[in-house]
Image (cartoon, grey):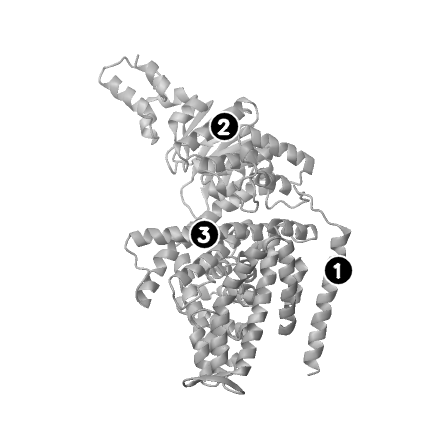
Amino acid sequence: MDRIRRDFTTVTLVMIPVAIAINIAVGQLVVALKLPLYLDSIGTILVAVLAGPLAGLVTGVLANLIWTLTGLAPFAAAFAIVAGIIGLMAGLFAGWGWFRRLWLWLLAGVLTGIVAALVSAPISAYLFGGVMGSGQDFLVAFFRATGASVMQATFGQGIVADPLDKLVSFLLVWLTLRALPKRFLQRFPRVENVTGRPE
Amino acid sequence: MIELEGVTFTYAGETSPALHQLDLRIGQGELWAVLGATGAGKSTLCSLLAGFIPHFYHGALSGTVRVAGIDVGASSLAVMSEQVGSVFQNPFNQVTGARYTVREEIGFGLENLGIPQDEMLLRIERSLSLTGLSDLAERSPYALSGGQQQRLAIASILALQPRLMVLDEPTSQLDPAGTGQVFTLLRQLVTAGEATVVLAEQRLEWVSQVADRCLVLQNGRKVGEGTPSDVLSRAEVGSWGLQETRFSRAARAAAARGLIRPHDALPQTLDQAAEHFR
Amino acid sequence: MLLALAFAVPWWACALTLFLLVFPLAAVAQVLGPLARTLWKIVLPFAIPILLIQGFFWGEGQVLFTLGPLSFYRAGLIFAAASIARIAMLGGCFLLLSMTTRVDMLMRALVERGLPSQALYLVVTTLQLVPRFQAQAHRIQDAQRTRGLETEGTLWRRAQALVPLIGPLLLASLMDVEERALALEARGFSRRGPRSSLVTLHDSAGQRWLRRFLWTLAVALILFRLFAWVTR
């Protein structure tokens, strides 16, 4: 309980809206650049590393709910759980020290992506038949053509796209935090995830 | 109102102190300007007066710091922020984002303090008129200019009725119009007895028009204290790393060439310069 | 209004009929035009791919027609129609909610009922920051483009464009966090103790009864659906 209060400092609470805005801005930018990725969890992962898994969870869930509220991506809310899990896992991995070694951190990204795919497949299959109107739809078509069920096809799409997407997202977060001066990182509750020493 | 004795502070993880053996006394109802080059310790002093040091920025603090009768080191961030209001450099960052109109934005701090609703409405109206924002009360805080946003920050702090207002280079990101608005407002507030102000600034021209007294810092040490005209006319001014006004430079150059008789006080403003060169 | 969301759960046939509820409500709130237009814009990019992919790749059952080597399946059509109806209904409900409710008033109502006030800050601030950040992302994009950054072209080149676009955005935002936090502290944000409210919210007995009715109806529908599914 005390850990929760220590994680949710004013700095954390300020960071969350900023992180969510980053999620959405970058997510839209990726669509504008027509890249086959989402990159809509970068802010969530940032919060998770700097303020812990619970903060990451809150950021992810809130991000998707608000994304829907803005009307930019109306179905994001359905995947709020997935976004929350991404934040949770990123925070847990960071808490276990995986951020400090790049290869471990990238592995964390891949694992998170796999779990994300597992959880989002049933949601996507149930609600949309797996089709999102995005660049990955051809993957779904491909899997259906080979005889897979809707659920399997959706999962097939996810298992290819999600780990890659999370890998890149985790990498971008790693690069960003490495570029920040140490003095500045002191502001954040879980600074030891990055620097390795509790202050 | 403010008493500092032998104050030394070193940020955590740093080796040299940001403030060194600082003594300072500031009375109520005064407008003090804190001058110094970048890194001289102005921001550190501001953070200290507001209680952010040592409760937000950690480090080694020694000496006595009393603000509005409170021992800063022994207090807490919550208590300090009720007594000392802070205004920062970036106007955009001081808009909380949690409210849709200027009026509600000012009310944000009042709501946090649990001020009763009728009292809130009175204080908000007062803040709006003191800062000249009454016409903009229903606008979104994000639809204001930089100068207006900075005045909004001041209004929001004023509404909390702090004993002291600390402003850390509030005009550094503003255009000349905005800068003028802020300096003029601060002077009006102090003259009307609404606030005691400590202002960290680099704009000497404005400072000399507006401040009652100045404090000059260099490398965390006090190197000068007094009225603006006293302090800014001293010969050592050049070595303090301050950005001299063009009037002072001109006067100094003219005196060096023997074009005018050397005066004691160097001009900081256009009017003073006109007088000086007569 | 809020509780219209509960209708999202039931089955696709219900979804279609409930459409007949959303549109009239929108008309009453005078947002029918914008709502219909936005809904159309949202649903269309889904509707076409879903119809095509599920229709042509369903793989089994009755075939409605053939187009060269591809067969269009009836089961696929039904599935697609169900999905589209569900999406449209969900979208309609959300749009109705967001177009008729002021978010901060909604949040204030929740805070009155015990939600921590930090939640109000989080939701409203995020909503206000998102458009600013998007504008900033666009500005950075334009600035980089004038410096010769390629945003069209091959996949690799577009991917390369990503880092100089995202980097400044992330770093600048994180740097600002410190000042923003201090500004909030200066307004008593982390103060423990009773808070007050600038606005008084109005509630009436009629609204309370409507809420209770909607809640019961929602629960009943969910139970009915679960029952039907379990006894299949």
At 59% from the left and 57% from the top, the residue drawn is C32
Tag in front: 2 or 1:
1
Question: Which residue corresponds to mark 1?
Answer: C212
Q: Chain of mark 1?
A: C
User: Which residue occupies the foreground of this view, C94 or B273?
Assistant: C94
Evaluate whether residue A101 shows in this view.
no
Q: Which mark is residue C133?
A: 3
Badge 1 and badge 3 both on one subunit: yes
Residue C154: give x, y in percent of width and height: 30, 67
- The CA distance from mark 1 to mark 3 is 39 Å
Where disc 1 sits, the SS reads: helix
Q: Amino acid at mark 3?
A: Phe
Q: Is residue A171 above or below residue B96?
A: below
Does residue A144 appear to the left or right of C17 in the view shown?
A: left
Q: Is residue A120 above or below residue B257?
A: below
Q: Which badge, 1 or 3, comes first in the chain's sequence?
A: 3
User: Which residue occupies the foreground of this view, C115 or B233?
Assistant: C115
At 48% from the left and 55% from the top, the residue drawn is A21
Q: Which mark is residue B13?
A: none
Crowd band around label 1 with a 10 angstrom C-alpha radius: few (<14), some (14–19), many (20+): few
Q: Chain of mark 2?
A: B
Q: Quadrant of residue A66?
A: bottom right
Q: Amino acid at mark 1?
A: Arg
Badge 2 and badge 1 both on one subunit: no
In this view, the residue farthest toward the bottom is C61
Question: Which residue corresponds to mark 2?
Answer: B186
Where disc 3 sits, the SS reads: helix
Residue A147: give x, y in percent of width and height: 48, 86
Q: Are marks 1 and 3 in contact (CB under 8 Å)?
A: no
